Amino acid sequence: MSSGFSLDELTAALHDAVLKAANIGEQAALANIQKEEHWIAAKDKDGNPELDEQGCPIYRPRMVTLRMPMWIDGKQIEQDLSVPISTLVSNRQLALDEIKIKLQV
């Protein structure tokens, strides 16, 4: 008699592994968009840091300009759009497309 895992234990272990991997990916994505280079500290008219009601500094997203082709009145033109740089970061650090398990019963 084998002393291996039961099918329920194996399924639970795989489920836990997938959830942990997804959590690692989410934490990496969050850490990526929290990087300092994605944000600019807001300043008041005197150049001092702008603060919210709780006294915490306010940050605004760093923007980039993208020149995008658009159709307007049947004509394709290029138009400049301001976009937060953090939206251009891929949040797919970890993805599980397929899993194959070979069992001997």
Image (cartoon, grey):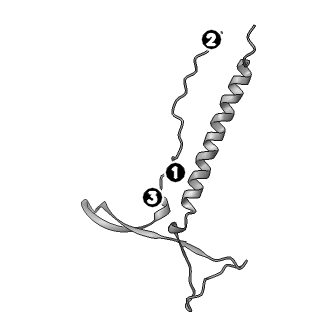
Callout 2 touching callout 1 (CB < 8 Å): no
Q: Secondary structure at mark 3?
A: helix
Residue type of the residue flagged with mark 3: Leu
Q: Nearer the viewer, residue 52 or 34?
A: 34
Looking at the image, residue 9 lies above or below residue 76? above
Q: CA distance from mark 3 to mark 2?
A: 46 Å
Mark 1 residue element: loop
* C-alpha gap between disc 3 and disc 1: 9 Å
In the rendered view, does 22 fall on the left or right side of 38?
A: right
Label whose residue precedes the other's in the sequence (2 or 1)? 1
Q: CA distance from mark 2 to mark 1?
A: 37 Å
Q: Residue 25 appears at what percent x and percent y? A: 58, 46
Q: In the rendered image, which residue does mark 2 sit on? A: 104
Tag shown at residue 88: 3
Front tag of 3 and 2:
2
Q: Which of the 4 image quadrants contains residue 94?
A: top right
